[in-house]
């Protein structure tokens, strides 16, 4: 403390706090090297978006990004956080989930992002969204907000598949699409996508890392992503509280299965399943939770016939559906 002018006037604190950091600061610092800028060029334009260094294999690295930025591209390049730009190969595109996979062989070390578990997200959890550096300013956008629990949303109107999507109060721009949504430990929870059907422009959305794992495993092999769409939205029974089970006439001791909350018109489930049904088995195997059902559907393809064991109005029965 020092007096201003030495008189009897009030003391003025001239000690200024500089360089104040938070947990978010640490996450950004440790993760920025895993976030890249995707630069797409054709004869008419140059467009930019973001991407994530998802993993590596021998001399190759794999980068996840959105598919929309790849449409109409003559060339695709990856600009690393160091400012170095290299051409990339498009390995595959999943237009249903709007996830694209790139591969390249950089002559330097890279930092792959740390993978989290989106199934552990708690409603109200803090999350961080990051984008690649803008090539005109060299700045990188970082935003911070609160997430809800993952839900199911259509990302492509041409398919009745509903993706595992995290909604947060983070507003993102087109430059941020393809970038990561992170938890406060700096682990990947999802990849930022455009506003889905029924979504709000004032919110941000990311396809969950758990579904990205399933998509990556197929895209990496150069295959089209195979899945069978049922066309429902569901909630895991093990996430329901006692009063929610009681209201739905679900046994309080039931801990596996999924509750149907919506059936999409024209989907495989339309006319077969309805809101309030509880699916407990698929082809004789227990459905543990919503993501277990999703994983089982990734093991099928359009046209496959599956048999569900379900509980409707307190009685057990089985139904057959042809996946789309």
Image (cartoon, rainbow, N blue to C red):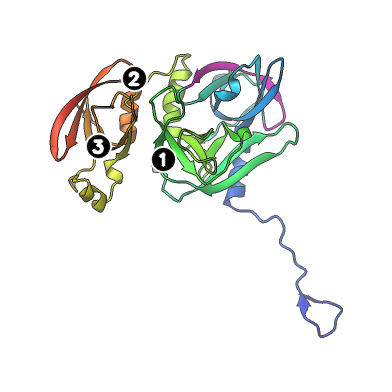
Q: Residues within 10 Å of mark 1 (few under 14, many from 20)?
A: many
Q: Which mark is residue 293?
A: none
Observer-nearest residue: 65 or 14? 65
Is residue 118 found inside the magenta-colored segment of the image? no
Q: CA distance from mark 1 to mark 3?
A: 17 Å
**Residue 189 in sight:** no
Q: Secondary structure at mark 3?
A: loop
**Residue 277 in sight:** yes
Residue drawn at the location 63% of the way across and 38% of the way down: 32
Residue 54 screen position, x and y as percent? 53, 28
Q: Which mark is residue 324?
A: 2
Q: Identify the image quadrant of the C terminus.
A: top left
Residue drawn at the location 23% of the way across and 42% of the way down: 255
Residue drawn at the location 58% of the way across and 32% of the way down: 177
Q: CA distance from mark 2 to mark 3?
A: 22 Å
Is residue 89 found inside the magenta-colored segment of the image? yes
Residue 43 screen position, x and y as percent? 71, 14
Name the residue that disc number 1 marks: 150
Which region shows up in magenta?
81-95
Q: Secondary structure at mark 2?
A: loop
Q: CA distance from mark 1 to mark 2?
A: 23 Å
Quick one: label 1 or label 3, which is nearer the N terminus? 1
Q: Residues within 10 Å of mark 3 (few under 14, many from 20)?
A: many
């Amino acid at each position: 403390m020092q007096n201003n002018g030495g008189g009897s006037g009030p003391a003025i604190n001239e000690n200024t706090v500089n360089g104040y950091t938070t947990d978010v600061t640490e996450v950004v610092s440790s993760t920025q090297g895993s976030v890249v800028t995707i630069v797409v060029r054709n004869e008419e334009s140059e467009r930019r978006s973001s991407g994530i260094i998802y993993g590596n294999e021998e001399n190759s690295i794999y980068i996840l990004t959105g598919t929309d930025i790849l449409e109409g591209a003559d060339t695709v390049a990856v600009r690393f956080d160091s400012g170095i730009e290299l051409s990339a190969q498009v390995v595959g595109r999943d237009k249903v989930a709007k996830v694209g996979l790139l591969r390249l062989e950089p002559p330097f070390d890279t930092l792959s992002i740390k993978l989290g578990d989106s199934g552990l997200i708690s409603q109200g959890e803090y999350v961080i969204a990051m984008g690649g550096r803008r090539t005109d300013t060299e700045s990188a956008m970082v935003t911070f907000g609160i997430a809800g629990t993952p839900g199911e949303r259509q990302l492509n109107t041409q398919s009745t598949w509903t993706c595992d999507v995290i909604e947060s109060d983070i507003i993102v721009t087109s430059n941020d699409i393809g970038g990561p949504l992170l938890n406060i430990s700096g682990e990947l929870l999802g990849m930022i996508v455009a506003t889905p059907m029924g979504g709000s422009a004032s919110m941000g959305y990311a396809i969950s890392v758990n579904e990205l794992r399933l998509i990556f495993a197929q895209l990496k092999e150069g295959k089209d992503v195979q899945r069978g769409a049922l066309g429902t939205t569901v909630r895991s029974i093990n996430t329901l509280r006692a009063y929610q089970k009681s209201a739905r006439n679900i046994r309080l001791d039931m801990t596996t299965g999924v509750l149907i909350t919506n059936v999409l018109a024209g989907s495989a489930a339309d006319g077969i399943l309805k809101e309030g049904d509880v699916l407990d088995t698929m082809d004789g195997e227990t459905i543990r939770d919503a993501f277990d059902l999703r994983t089982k559907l990734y093991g099928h393809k359009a046209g496959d016939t599956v048999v569900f064991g379900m509980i409707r109005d307190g009685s057990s029965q089985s139904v057959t559906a042809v996946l789309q």
